[in-house]
Image (cartoon, rainbow, N blue to C red):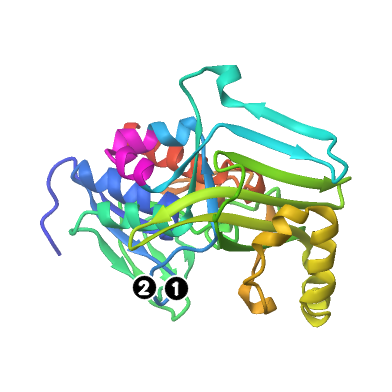
Amino acid sequence: MPEQKPGRLHIAIVGYGTAGQAAAILLSRDGHRVEVFERSPSLGPVGAGVLLQPVGLRVLWEMGLLEIALDHGRRVDRLFGETPAGLPVMDMRYANLDPRIYGLGMQRGALFSILAAAVNDEVQVHCARRIISCSEDGRRIEDDAGCSHGPFDLVLGADGSTSLLRVSAGPPKLDRPYPWGALWCLLDESDWAFPHELRQRYVRARKMIGLLPVGTRPGDPTPRLSFFWSLPTARFEAWSSAGLAPWLDEIRALWPEAHGLLDGIADAAQLSRASYRDAIPRRWQRNRLALIGDAAHAMSPQLGQGVNMALLDALALRDA
């Protein structure tokens, strides 16, 4: 085992999403020894697009990553939602709060790549390690193969809304699947008329469709839009079995302009499915274990705050 320098902590981070990546970057830069445990056999992003708010952009600036994020992301100045009849439901402009601020639409793949490139080479990342529990003192973690890892000075549970470490911090107040999910994919921006706006259409509280400009990603200069369609998770299979034709007809009726962007969608497999959780921990910390990101405060991606809160958590830890 490497000799531990005074003040240098040995930290385990469980999960390699935005919270885990950002924490690994900031804590390793402060000289701490960091090990990351990721359940997936290979590293990569999950999701289509995110909306970085001014607070999230501030964290990227602190990390020295704002410039490259701006190079790939798409500036968003307005959040607008309406009914199919054109009745405005939401109209929010960042400039009304402060003319200097804005949002930034980004492909999750772009944000993942930017953060991954900034992770210190000394950070050890262990893939295919599904961590299922943390010891009561918060010094050791155990994977699903029965292997124990540690001891650590600090364990960070950054394993997302379906966190298995949440229970190790104490019985949660609430932890259950959320009935609504979404279908999503990335589309070519093409000649979309609103390249700096999040646009949504609503049918009461029963249907929501949205398009967010998310720019480019490293290795792919094509500007994209993140498309999403809200759907109860219980209807995922029925939607897939019915084929795309009735669904595309429904989109044509609700939003003809959006329908035109879906010409390249010919199979249900081209759309990914997202499911969410209602998860409220009674406590986010126990001894040497702390929860961050969606493990601590699960957030629907459609609220546009999850990735920002994950970045803020990592910065708060760095400054603690």
Please determine whether, in this image, residue 61 is positioned above or below residue 302: above
Instruction: Please tell me whether mark 1 sits on a helix, a strand or a loop.
Output: loop
x, y percent for residue 14: 42, 60
Range shown magenta = 59-71
| In this rendering, position of residue 95 left or right of residue 16 | right
At label 1, which amino acid type do we have?
Answer: Ser
Instruction: Please tell me whether mark 2 sits on a helix, a strand or a loop.
Output: loop
Q: Residues within 10 Å of mark 1 (few under 14, many from 20)?
A: some
* Front in this rendered view, residue 270 or 54: 270
Please determine whether, in this image, residue 44 is positioned above or below residue 293: below
x, y percent for residue 207: 83, 53
Report, in whole angstroms, how far the alpha carbon at label 1 lies from the one at label 2: 6 Å
Place residue 181 in its image quadrant. Answer: bottom right
| In this rendering, position of residue 3 left or right of residue 213 | left
Say whether marks 1 and 2 touch (CB < 8 Å).
yes
Give me the residue at 36% from left, 44% from top.
69
Give me the residue at 84% from left, 63% from top.
250
- Is residue 191 found inside the magenta-colored segment of the image? no
- Residue that badge 1 annotates: 40
x, y percent for residue 303: 65, 43
- Residue that badge 2 annotates: 127
Please determine whether, in this image, residue 104 is positioned above or below residue 129: above
* Front in this rendered view, residue 206 or 213: 213
At label 2, which amino acid type do we have?
Answer: Cys
